[in-house]
Amino acid sequence: MAIPWNNICTDYYGNTFGTGPSHHGNDARGFNASGVFLRGHWAAKFRDVTDGESQVILVGEILPSKSDHYVNGWFHFNSPWALTSAPINYPIVGVGDSGFSWGNANPPLNPHSCTHFKAWTTVQGFKSAHKGGAQYVFCDGSVQFLSENMDYITYQRLGDRRDGQPLGNEWNTNY
């Protein structure tokens, strides 16, 4: 979930905790994952979620038209890949949006400072049609609405199952 593409996209850089060097999640070794899944090759067991199941995101909402890989459908081999590297509801140009073009050099990606490859840190971020945030399922089975105004580092910690830093009890009451 929290991905370590440091300095690839200067807007939002992803995991800075050093807990998940598998950039695309293509690895099958859990020690290379900060989140709970590696694109179909590995999934965390409860014992692997050392930060506590109530403080780690399992899955969240996505908008298929706003994701580089979900536009192919949820069953496509590239689809199970959503991240906390971009802030919640980070605005990108998606399929059906004004300015979108498959022939463009960087479709349907972030219209700001990132190129196609570099924008994966933002285009694969969780997005919803909800005003002000998105719904998430945590590893303990709870469902929580998280504000798109959430502190970026706190959000990164929620996407990392083993960063080792406590969030405190107040994180979910303020968002």
Image: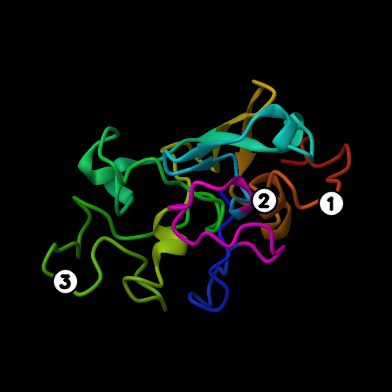
Give the residue pinned by disc 1. Answer: 165
**Who is closer to the viewer here, 108 or 141?**
141
> Residue at (74%, 47%) from the top-left corner?
162
Q: CA distance from mark 3 to mark 2?
A: 31 Å
Residue indicated by mark 3: 104
Q: Give the image quarter of residue 76.
A: top left
Residue nearer the viewer, 124 or 35: 35
In front of the other: label 2 or label 1?
Answer: 1
Kind of residue at badge 2: Tyr
**Residue 130, position as x, y percentages in the image:** 47, 36
Q: Position of residue 89 (x, y in %)?
A: 48, 50
Give the CA separation, mark 2 to mark 1. 12 Å
Q: Which residue is mark 2?
A: 155
- Does 24 appear in magenta? yes
The reply to whether the C-beta atoms of the residues labelled 3 and 2 are less than 8 Å apart is no
Q: Earlier in the sequence, mark 1 or mark 3?
A: 3
At horizontal 61% and vertical 35% (from top left) the residue drawn is 44
Residue 10 in the magenta stretch? The answer is no
Region rendered in magenta: 15-31
Residue 67, label in figure: none
Label 3 SS: loop
Q: Are marks 2 and 1 in contact (CB under 8 Å)?
A: no
- Foreground residue among 95 and 163: 163
Instruction: Give the side of residue 104 with respect to residue 61, left or right.
Output: left
Q: Amino acid at mark 1?
A: Gln
**Residue at 80% in and 42% down:** 171
The alpha-carbon separation of the residues under discs 1 and 3 comes to 41 Å
Q: Quadrant of the C terminus?
A: top right
Badge 2 or badge 1: first in the primary sequence:
2
